[in-house]
Image (tube, helix red, strand yellow):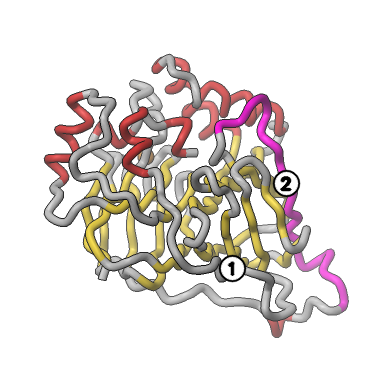
Amino acid sequence: MKKLLACAAALALSASGLVAGAASAGADSHHSHSSVSVVGNGSHVTLSRSSVDAGVVRFRVSSTFAGGSSNITMFQPKAHVNVARVLADLQEEFSSDPATAAKGTRDLVRDARFFGLADVGPGTPAVVTERLARGTYYLMDLGAPPTGAPALTTLRVRGDGDRDEHGDHGDHLSLPRARATVEVTSADRFVVHGRLPAHGTVRVHNVSDTIHFMDISPVKKGTTDAQIQAFFDSNSQQPPSFFVDGPSVGMDVQSPGRQAFLTYRLPPGTYVLLCFVADDETGMPHALMGMHKVVTLK
Ligand SMILES: [Cu+2]
């Protein structure tokens, strides 16, 4: 989601370059009913299976989008809301008019639930693990600005009642152990508990009353949050002085109350956590209102 929500300069900041090394997401290595490969090409999502069992589900997310990174969002319309309504809300959210964008955020919170998934570039896959209830979910890749309605891919999560004979409880997954937790708060801030790993798992928990995402973008060593805020305040259209053209990864949009585990591998160094969802009152991207946090990945 970030690309369409971000200002041009912020876009430059979070654009990730190609990295050496092959994507390792690949096919599922075993026949778990709860593990699925998710591949985005910038505008379309392909799944290795069309249904999984309810409970803990593991998504191995990767991208083949050579022109940038995949922003893979998974959502579900709330009761009595149809998919077209959610896509119309999304259109508002992408508006360059702040009042319309603010309404888009409010409408998305009202009409849909968001479950991540992940923002990944070619060569920088990630795994998202989370608990899912039975139901139908929709995935889309908004990495390339969509022309018209985004293409949706359906995932069915089966409950106990409709599990087949092979779906015994033995192959259920458990949640991974996280090295750190990032709480996303109502003050539009990232609160980090523990130390973010360069290679490992982070639990991302939205404890706020609106939707947020969390991109992890590289910046130059020594960069401060004050410098980042000054850059946003300047309205500069140039790439910021602290910009680093390196791999990034992110947790895509999550609804209030949701938590998910993001497992990734990035070069150790200095990064900034960013969210560009439009504020539900001002329409301003959260990052410009202070939702950025410089962190060191070790
Ligand atoms: Cu946010």
> Range of the magenta residues?
145-165
Element at badge 1? loop
The residue shown at (53%, 68%) is 22
Identify the residue shown where x is 37% and y is 65%.
266
Q: Is residue 158 magenta?
A: yes
Name the front one of labels 2 and 1: 1
Q: For mark 2, what is the residue?
A: 153
Rendered position, 37 above or below 274:
below
| Residue 5 as seen in the image, left or right of residue 292 | right
User: Where's residue 133, x and y in %?
Assistant: 66, 58
Quarter containing ligand 1?
top left
In the current view of this chain or complex, which residue is farthest to the right? 165
Res 232 → quadrant: top left
Q: Say which residue appears at 52% left-offset and 65% top-offset.
A: 127
Q: What amino acid type should be assigned to the residue bearing mark 1?
A: Ala
Nearest the eye: 88 or 236 = 236
Is residue 152 part of the magenta span, yes or no? yes
Q: In this view, does 177 lie above or below 133?
A: below
